Image (cartoon, helix red, strand yellow):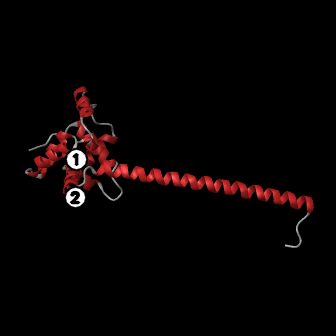
Amino acid sequence: MSVKFTEAFKIQAVQKALNRSADSNIKDVADLLGVGFSTLTKWIRQAKNHEFEMASEAELKMMSNEKRPQDWTLEERLEIIIQCAALDEKAINELCRESGIYPHHIQQWKTDFVNGKKSSSVTSRSGEVKELKIENKALKKELNRKDKALAETAALLVLQKKVNAIWGADEDS
């Protein structure tokens, strides 16, 4: 049985493969997406040669209506986790393609629920942003203090040179 992938899925798969982290390879991405390694490399080659067809208006509309994984509510996440519980890997991959997400999103959401996290991306990002703002404010304050000290030191050096030029170098020191 041959699985027909949409152009939108192929494009997303190529983008995911090309934007992968340094510690993963194309084989890992292919396994994660539930496609063959040779299929994914073929899609990458086609994308580089601009061989993908332009998406129809219906596909573009469908893609624009798809939610990003981080936009899913907790209820929606729980519902898809429950749906996937009884499915095999192939069926999970198909459901993910239909839903516009990847299997690793479901795994992460499941882990978050088990660990009691409300929303790993939202909670951790807001905490990180707050910490970074505090750190940024402290660094700006320190930089401002050091700039003032540097300006004062430069002014003292200039004055010292003028004093030495007018009265001569201090021979006692």
Q: Secondary structure at mark 2?
A: helix
| Residue displayed at 34% across by 42% down | 48
Q: Position of residue 9 (x, y in %)?
A: 23, 40
Q: Amino acid at mark 1?
A: Tyr
**CA separation in Å, label 2 and label 1:** 21 Å
Q: Amino acid at mark 2?
A: Asn
| Residue displayed at 37% across by 52% down | 127
User: In the picture, which quadrant includes the C terminus?
Assistant: bottom right
Q: Nearer the viewer, residue 61 or 12?
A: 61
Other-residue count near label 2 (Cα within 10 Å), few / some / many at <14 / 14–19 / ≥20:
few
Q: Nearer the viewer, residue 4 or 158?
A: 158
Residue farthest bottom in this picture? 172
Q: Position of residue 132 (x, y in %)?
A: 45, 52
| Marking on residue 124 | none
> In the image, is 92 to the left or to the right of 139?
left
Q: Secondary structure at mark 1?
A: loop
Residue farthest right in this picture? 167
Chain-order first, disc 2 or disc 1: 1
User: In the picture, which quadrant includes the N terminus?
Assistant: top left
> In the image, is 99 to the left or to the right of 23?
left
Q: Position of residue 10 (x, y in %)?
A: 25, 41
| Marking on residue 102 | 1
- Look at the picture and state if 144 lies above or below 169: above
Q: Nearer the viewer, residue 112 or 69?
A: 112
Residue farthest top in this picture? 57
> In the image, is 23 to the left or to the right of 57?
right
Q: Position of residue 85 (x, y in %)?
A: 10, 51
| Residue displayed at 23% across by 49% down | 105
Q: Count the marks: how many?
A: 2
Name the residue tied to disc 2: 115
Quadrant in the picture for residue 155: bottom right
